[in-house]
Amino acid sequence: LVFYRRSADLMTVFLIMFFWILLMSSIMYYVEREAQPDNFVSIIRSIYFVVVTLFTVGYGDVTPKTALG
């Protein structure tokens, strides 16, 4: 019942999270691709890094190497 009442709010939050993840993945790809060409192969692969960093404590298998990253 609560999810139904607040479905518009939840969709807004999920949409904002989706665009935030896409934006951060794109930024990390362009910042880190020269320093780590095997880990940041594409923006799609960079999504893994962003999702793990934002929603967990991180696995530590991919870490930024540049100062901006």
Image (cartoon, helix red, strand yellow):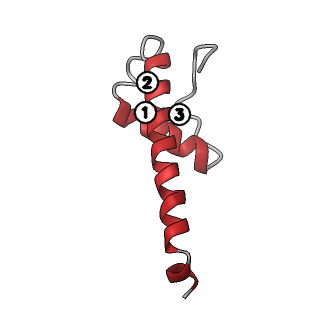
Image quadrant of residue 58?
Answer: top right
In the picture of the structure, the residue carrying the numbered disc 3 is 61
Q: Quadrant of the N terminus?
A: bottom right
Q: Secondary structure at mark 1?
A: helix
Q: Earlier in the sequence, mark 1 or mark 2?
A: 2
Q: Secondary structure at mark 3?
A: loop
Q: Are marks 1 and 2 in contact (CB under 8 Å)?
A: yes
Q: At label 3, which amino acid type do we have?
A: Asp
Q: Residue 65 at x, y = what percent?
A: 58, 17
Going from the N terminus, do you reach mark 1 or mark 3 first?
1
Residue on which disc 1 sits: 46
Q: Position of residue 24 (x, y in %)?
A: 51, 33
Please, is residue 44 above or below residue 18 in the view? above
Q: Does 47 appear above or below 5?
A: above
| Residue for badge 2 | 29
Q: Position of residue 61 (x, y in %)?
A: 53, 34
Q: Distance from label 3 to label 2 (Cα)? A: 16 Å
- What residue is at 57 percent from the left and 27 percent from the top? 63
Q: Earlier in the sequence, mark 3 or mark 2?
A: 2
